[in-house]
Image (tube, coloured by chain):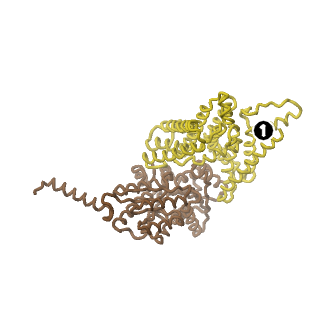
Chain colours: A brown, B yellow
Amino acid sequence: MRLTSKARSLLAGAAALGLLALAWSPAPARAEDKPMTIAFVSGPLNDSFFPPLYQGAQDAAKALGVRLHYIPIDEADIEATSARTMQVAIAQKPDAIVVGDFVTSVVDPYIKQAVAAGIPVYVNQSGQDQWKADGAFGFVGQQGPEVGRVAAERLAGAGAKDILCVINVPGNPYLQAICKGLAEKVQQLGIKSSNLELPTADSTDQAKVSRDIGAYLQSHKSIDGVFTENAAVGTAATAAVDAAGLGGKVHVATMEISRIALEQIQNGKIDFLVNEQPYLDGYFGVVFAAFYAKFGLAPVGVVATGPSIVDKTNIAKILKVFDTYPNVIGSK
Amino acid sequence: MSSAGTSNGRGGGAAAPPAAGAVRRMVMQALLRPEAGGVASAVLVFAFFAVFAGENGFLSPLGTANWLDSAADLGIVAVAVGMLMIGGEFDLSVGSVVGAASMIVAICMGYFALDPWVGIVLAFAFAGLVGLVNGLLVIRTRLPSFIVTLATMLMVMGGMLGVAIALTGSSSLSATPSGLAKLLFAAKFREFHVSILQWIVLSTLATYAMHRTVFGNWVYATGGNAQTARLAGVPVARVKVILFICASLAAALSGVNETLSFQNGNITLGAQYVFTGIAAAVIGGVLLTGGYGSPVGTMFGSVTYGIVSLGVFYLGWNSDLANFFIGLLLLLAVLANHRLRELAMGRR
């Protein structure tokens, strides 16, 4: 049978599509028409860190044609919901689980349980010291203490001698680990640091957070550096510094990226931002889990997504991407 | 201390016969007013921090602005919540309305770059609707408002998060105000925010409404005993619906204020008001059972809470214990408040 060149290329295209479809059809043992399912246990979307992570996970799921079940924990009840969300994930019998191991003592037994039940688990964002012992097949994310160390180093480099580390979710072990890393590095450098754990009732109130930090600065006059763990708290800190007339004396740096925080990098109110690149956490989490479940292939060991730094040297590029692609770097 | 309002809807007008010891009687009568305890608590905690934190900047202009701002932010919500409580109902949904109003403003202004007033008007309209639904649900179902508004709180929170993620993919957006909107909701003189002015205006209006209008009498009657009030011809249902709407609108004002002041909208804003709004009203002398209390009292309850929750950071002590001290000082303030009322009542 003779085919026109047009028909031939159509056929070739169809064959290529078929191959692609085959490549992403589920494992032969499973029902042919059922797409792969990945359960993703991570943080709540009302915490501004997580929407970019969710966006990354969704984009990867779409690109690969896998079904994504995003199961958020509740930060106000972090231990109990960490357990419950893993139970839900395991009960769904997904092809793979991606989990943010925020409270290792609670989550680790469930990771082991999932692995024992034949569900591969990929650890994401938090849990870098535990994933291997739990039987997970890999880790993508950053190590909390490392973020603190990098922040301490850079603030000290800017001239800070007494750094305040602000913890905005009281009792959150991941955020505490970051301030601990900062304290360790500060000690090595021979300077000082202290922690300010915000009262639970204030942690969602930017105005009150700003005044709390301002009051703390007024009553601890030697503080000349502030490190915060999300962008809203960071801009609350710069407002407090401005109000107290301490601009230029107190250096401010923060984790996470927001539009206002980027503007404050430009006008010098914030020294630098720690970009945790949550989009990559979500995207790679889904990609690696899907590859492992399908092909048994995965990067070996830890894939580090942070800490990456945004300061005056790279702000132009970051700002452009921030404005062009919502939720890839941060929310608009 | 209290300048606004000369009679409170409940018993304040009971005139003492002019006789010897009139001054003493006047003092006793002042102590019997519902706001006496709130005023006492505020004076007590102010004295405490003036002594222990005065040198750390608590008494400085910035320190004063800080606690006044805190009291105002809380007081705007608390005055409406307090009136609703006097009317015999709770509203747990105010916190979620603060966050929802914040997101509506930020989505309209920050994400879709619309005129600030589109978002602001929508935010207040949405809040009014939530208040209306709260009120109608409570009236129609006769379920406790505690449960009804707990349900609407979760629905508003979850619904708004869903809408925000669907429209913008995010739960935290920037919003930079300008012009009249900035002046009305985000202006400040040094560090004294315009919210202090709003708070005073709203509290004055509330005081006028509660003590000088028929509506105020209706509110006290409704909260005191709804059944009797209904028999006496008080439009109980209408009173409650209006109070629910006021509480929601006050919450929306708080959300708009904070969003425009900090140029950032966030869905979790206001979560604390579930507790602190009620706490401020109770510290200020509003009874949890309804029928008793005053806007002036709530105002001083907010001052008490504002001073305590901020003052702990001026102490220069270990901040890990901040929550503990806030709790302890509030307990002492309420105990003092309660004891004062007992003393006054006992001597009458």
Say whether residue A207 is left or right of residue B60: left
- What is the crowding at mark 1: few (fewer than 14 residues within 10 Å), some, or many (at least 20)? many
Judging by the rendered image, the residue that carries numbered circle 1 is B32
User: Is residue B183 in view from this perspective?
Assistant: no
Q: Nearer the viewer, residue A232 or A115?
A: A115
Q: Quadrant of the N terminus of chain A?
A: bottom left
At horizontal 57% and vertical 50% (from top left) the residue drawn is: A204
Instruction: Kindly give the residue lying farthest to the right in the view shown.
Output: B20
Residue at the spot x=85%, y=29% of the render?
A: B18
Does B98 sit above or below residue A126? above
Residue A248 showing in the rendered view: yes
**Residue B32, image quadrant:** top right
Residue B121 vertical placement versus A102 (above, below): above
Q: Is residue A39 left or right of residue A109?
A: left
Secondary element under disc 1, as helix, strand or loop, is: helix
Left or right placement of residue B186 versus residue B55 in this view: left
- The residue sitting at the bottom extreme is A133
Q: Output the chain of dot 1.
A: B
Residue A91 image offset from top left, x and y in percent: 45, 60
Q: A253 or B106, which lies in front?
A: B106
Taking depth in this image into account, of B237 and A218 the one nearest to the observer is B237
Relative to A275, B248 lies left or right: right
Q: Position of residue B226 (x, y in %)?
A: 66, 34
Residue type at mark 1 is Leu
